[in-house]
Image: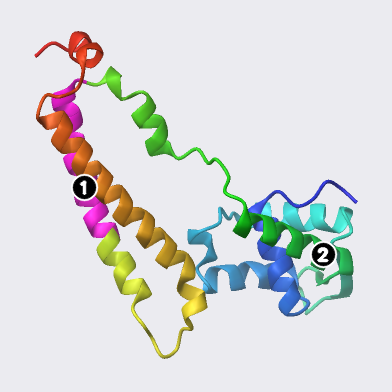
Amino acid sequence: MAGGVSNPLGLVVLAFLQERPMHPYELGRLLKARNKQESIKYRHASLYMVVKQLLRDGYIEPQETSRAGQLPERTVYALTPSGQEELTRQMRELVAVPAKEYPRFEAALALIVVLPPDDVAVLLGDRLEALERRIAELRERVRPSPDVEWVHKIEYEYELALAEAEQRYVARLRAQVASGDVGTLWSGLHPR
């Protein structure tokens, strides 16, 4: 066995195979049908590479291979007991243990002094408008629906909470920058 599944797409494959054996094409269709590509980076070629890695590591195994007419052979994969253990272990860790992530906006904030404060105030206003649109979209997605269970919207609820928190932060930061209260280093780099 390898050191574990570190790729979120690998976890998607294991989770879907927990439901039933499938071939990679079906896994990709299901991923798109459930909109998981909005939470997990997905490319068709990456899916096949991840399936190969999971097979190599013993987390999945071929169950059957078939061909329909002129179509290429399709191998249906099933989750192995070690794949089930790995999925459970990884999910427990992901849910329980906060991890440092590196969002692009955080990187921008770390380097924000390279921009003049007046530009930053305008750009933060643009970001606030974009956040307002995203928040409205997310609120629509999390609205109760009789044909979609709550648990299938949970990642949108999380994204909504993050977007609302970011909106509050950006509004405070924009007000501070617009007031001219940016400190001597920043104002020294960009005299008004």
Cα distance in 3D space between marks 1 and 2: 43 Å
Mark 2, residue position: 85
Q: Identify which residue is drawn at 75% across, 60% down.
A: 89
Residue 35, above or below 123: below
Q: Identify which residue is drawn at 90% across, 51% down.
A: 1
Quarter of the rendering containing residue 83: bottom right
Residue 186, above or below 141: above
Residue 128: numbered disc: 1
Within 10 Å of disc 1 (Cα), the crowding (few <14, some 14-19, many 20+) is many
Q: Position of residue 27 (x, y in %)?
A: 67, 69
Q: Amino acid at mark 1?
A: Leu
Quarter of the rendering containing residue 64: bottom right
Q: Using residue 87 as the reference point, say whether residue 186 is left or right of it.
A: left
Q: Quadrant of the C terminus?
A: top left
117 in the magenta segment: yes
Residue 35: numbered disc: none
Quarter of the rendering containing residue 31: bottom right
73 in the magenta segment: no
What range is drawn magenta here? 116-134
Q: Position of residue 65 (x, y in %)?
A: 87, 74
| SS majority, magenta | helix
